[in-house]
Amino acid sequence: MIRVLICDDQDIVRQGLEVILSKASNIEVVGAAEDGAEALELIPQTQPDIVLMDLKMPGMNGIVATQRICDQFPEVKVLVLTTYDADEWVFDAIRSGASGYLLKDTPRGELIHAIEGTASGKKHVDPDIAGKLLAHAARTSPAPKTKIVEELSEREVEVLKLLARGLTNADIAQRLFLSEGTVRNYVSAILAKLDVTDRTQAAILALRYGLVDANEET
């Protein structure tokens, strides 16, 4: 069972999330907090695997709470669930150590999938947020390439570079003279090796590590 602690200042949201999550056979809601301070108090008692964290709350907000949870309880993962998609909220939450960022209009099935993925150590970013992270990654100085290149084969690096430039599997297959099935296999291997759940997150890493120039022509 995946143990989840809900942190949101709105009672109706907490109740609604409890109902939604109770329908998943592998998820147990172990507690609910009205703000970050209460979440920190409840963690030792409830021992959650994941804290489902709102951001803008009275008292201790979700950014501060996320940072303190990551510092004090490193085994507990924080998955942000909020209505706020402004750049400063997104970047502050990720910098504070959040394992993922979802918006509250996320469909139930995707929310469950994100919780399951987060529990297994994967990162999950709402598609509407991913573009902001891509742009931010493109503006920052790239980290040394070796950190990511060491994980991938030469051909996988080629596929990742094209993927990060927005090419489809069909486009990549044509560029590299491969079948689409072979490209799909390479993409699956890349996602597994980089420990991400989708192409967008892989593209973010490619940009972050300087494997591709965001302004490069395709």
Image (cartoon, rainbow, N blue to C red):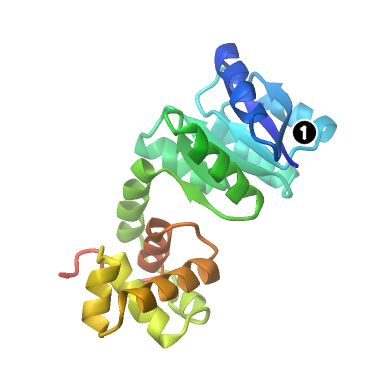
* Left or right: where 140 falls relative to 98: left
**Snapshot quadrant of residue 14:** top right
List the single residue furthest toward the right.
Answer: 45
Above or below, comparing residue 109 to residue 135 in the picture: above
Residue furthest to the left = 217
Q: Please state which of residues 177 and 10 is positioned toward the viewer in this rendering.
A: 177
Label 1 SS = helix
Label 1 is placed on what type of residue?
Answer: Ile
Which residue is nearer to you in this view: 217 or 126?
126
- Let me know if residue 13 appears in the view: yes
Q: Residue, x 30% and y 58% (percent of image)?
A: 139
Residue 218 screen position, x and y as percent: 17, 70
Residue 211: tell me if it is visible: no
Name the residue rendered at 67%, 45% in the picture. Answer: 70
* Image quadrant in which you'd find residue 3: top right
Left or right relative to 21: residue 82: left
